[in-house]
Image: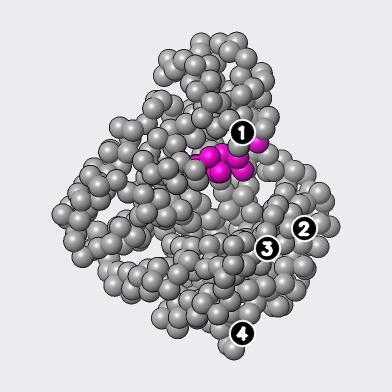
Amino acid sequence: MGKTGDRASLLGFGCMRLPLAGPKPNDIDYDLATRMVRSAVDRGVNYVDTAFAYHSGGTREEPGESEPFLAHALKGGYREKVRLATKLPTWMVGSRADMHKCLDIQLRRLDVGRIDYYLAHNLNAAVWPAMLEYGLFEFFEEAVKDGRISYPAFSFHDEYPLFETIVKSYDWPMVLVQYNYLDQEYQAGRAGVKLAASRGAAVVVMEPLRGGFLVRYMPDEPKEALRRIRPDWSLADWCLNWLWSQKEVSVVLSGMSDQAQTDGNVSAALAWEDGAFGEGESKAVDGVTAFFRERLKVDCTACGYCMPCREGVDIPKNMNFYNQLHLFDASEAKGRYRFFYSIQVSPPERAERCTACGKCVDKCPQHISVPDVLKRVAELFKGV
C-alpha cells in the first residue's frame, strides 16, 4: 500500500482509544500505551493512525494528546518501521493557508519531517463543498511536492452517494471508511469499499468491531451461534477475519485500549490465512446480521427521496440513529449511541425541528410515517 516492494500489515494500530492513567480523555497512560504500540510493531504491525483531535480534553478544536503521545512512542527507531497516518482537522479550516498551517503544527506535534498518509478528516456533506472551495486538492499536491506528506487520503462518515462523488473527484491513493459485518449497507458500505478498490485506492477499514459493540454488547443468541461454528475464535476474531476475507480490504484499523486487546488482535493477524473464512463462517455471519436486522424499528433504506426537508431535518440520519439505539440491549450501549447522535447530528438536522408537514410521507417509497417516527426520535434523544 503506497510503497513499492513492501505492503502494509493486515492490522493497523489506531490511537483513538488508548489506555488512560486518569479520568480525562487526554490522561493517556504513556507507559502502557507505549508498550502496546511497540509490542504490536515488534510483531509486524506497520500502520499507525492518529488525528489532531484524538484524546482531547474538551472540544474538537482543542489539540488532543494522541499525536504527542505517538511522537514519544515511535522514538528509538520505531518511526522508521511504520507508515504514519494523521488527519487534517477539516472543521478548523477556513482557507488553503489554514491547511498548510494545520499540517505544519501536526508535523511538530508528531516530531517528524514527513507524514506518510495525511487524511482529510471526516469528509461529509457539511465540509466537502468548503474543502473544494479552499483548494484541498491543490494543497495536497503542494504538500506532496515539498515532501511533507507522501500520500493524500480521506476519512468518511456520511452516505454512499457523497462517497461516490468524493472518490471519483480525485485519484486517491487511500480511503478510510467505517465497515464491519453489521454495517455492510451503512455509510460507504460494501459498495463504497468495492468502488474505491476498483479505482486503485487502498481501502483501510475503521470500526471493525463497531466501536467494541460487536464484542462487549453482543446478545447471547448470536454469540452462541458463532461459537458453535468456530469455538476457537473470539468475537473480535470473527470481525477481523470477515474483513480480511475480502480482497478489497488492505488494512483493518483497530483502536486498542489494553494489552490483551493488542495481543489478541495481533495474534489474529498472524494466524490469518487466505481461505480461513469459508462458506460456513459466511453463513454464520449472515445469521448474526439477520438477527440484528429483525431489531430494526423502521424500514428506512436511506434512499434520500424524502430530502430535502424544508426545516433542514436530516431524515435518513435520524432514522438511522433510531434504529441503532434498538440494536443492543445494554444501557451503556444506548448511552453511547446518544453520545454519537450529539456529535454526528447537528442541531439544525435534528428530529425535534420536524413540523409534521407530511411532505416527506408522500415521497417515501417505503411508506413510512416519517413525522411519527421523528417524534419518537426527538423523545429518545432529547437533551443530548
Q: Earlier in the sequence, mark 3 or mark 2?
A: 3
Q: Which residues are magenta?
A: 337-346
Q: Residues within 10 Å of mark 2 (few under 14, many from 20)?
A: many
Location of residue 258 by image quarter: bottom left
Between the residue at mark 3 and the residue at mark 2, the CA separation in whole angstroms equals 18 Å
Amino acid marked by disc 4: Lys
Mark sitting earlier along the chain (1/4): 4
Q: Position of residue 101 (x, y in %)?
A: 81, 62
Mark on residue 383? 1
- Amino acid carrying label 2: it is Met
| Kind of element beneath mark 4 | loop
Residue position marked by numbered label 2 in the rendering: 99
Q: Secondary structure at mark 3?
A: loop
Residue 93 belongs to magenta span: no
> Mark 3 near mark 2, Cβ–Cβ under 8 Å?
no
Residue 75's disc number = 4
Quadrant in the rendering for residue 68: bottom right
N-terminal of the pair, mark 2 or mark 4, is: 4
In space, the residues marked 3 and 4 are separated at their CA atoms by: 19 Å
| Residue shown at the point (45%, 81%) measured from the top left | 39
Which marked residue is nearer to the observer: mark 3 or mark 2? 3
